[in-house]
Image (cartoon, grey):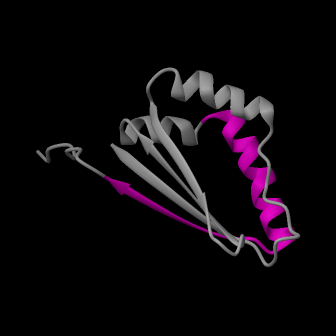
Amino acid sequence: MFVVTATYTRPNTSTPWFNQGDAFTQHFETAYRETGKCMESVGSISPDGLTTVRQITWASRSDFLQFLEDPMYLTVMASRDAYLESNGIVVTIERRLVNEQLPAQT
């Protein structure tokens, strides 16, 4: 498994979170959830409403790397990055391999 945790912190609660849109959400469901590549996605928001954390568990690192090359993802991430920058939202992303063997070195 491969786990990606994204933490977003906004400057105040009147700044809306980025919305990736229904088309991308449907694409993600069809291409990644329904195929078993994305195993779980959970989110939480801090009591003060300033921080949200989204953790996505991928079946494998290769499934996640395939997602990173998805043209629809690349388009949405460009929009997201511009939105975050213009609205003062800070994101930190942690990626970690869990219970998966790395390829043997020869």
The furthest residue to the front: 47
Q: Is most of the magenta stretch helix, strand or loop? A: helix
Residue 12: % across, % down: 81, 77
Q: Is residue 93 left or right of residue 24?
A: left
In the rendered picture of this protein, how many numbered marks are placed on residues?
0
Q: Is the residue 37 above or below the residue 69 in the image?
A: above
Quadrant, the C terminus: top left
Query: Horizontal and vertical percent for residue 43?
Result: 57, 53
Between 101 and 7, the residue placed more toward the observer is 7
Whether 95 is among the magenta residues is: yes
The outermost residue toward the left is 106
Q: Is residue 55 magenta?
A: no
Instruction: Report the quarter where the N terminus lies.
Output: top left
Q: Quadrant of residue 48?
A: bottom right
Q: Quadrant of residue 86?
A: bottom right
Q: In percent of the image, x 79 and y 55: which residue is there?
A: 18
Quick one: 2 or 45, which is closer to the camera? 45
Is residue 15 shown left or right of residue 98?
A: right
Please name the residue shown 80% across and 39% down the image: 21
Q: Which residues are magenta?
A: 70-97
Residue 2 vs 15, above or below: the answer is above
Q: Residue sitting at 14 percent across and 44 percent down?
A: 104
Q: Nearer the viewer, residue 82 or 53?
A: 53
Judge left or right: residue 29 versus residue 81. Answer: left
Q: Is residue 1 above or below residue 15?
A: above
Q: Residue at x 76, y 42 (%)?
A: 75
Quadrant position of residue 10: bottom right
Q: Position of residue 85 (x, y in %)?
A: 80, 69
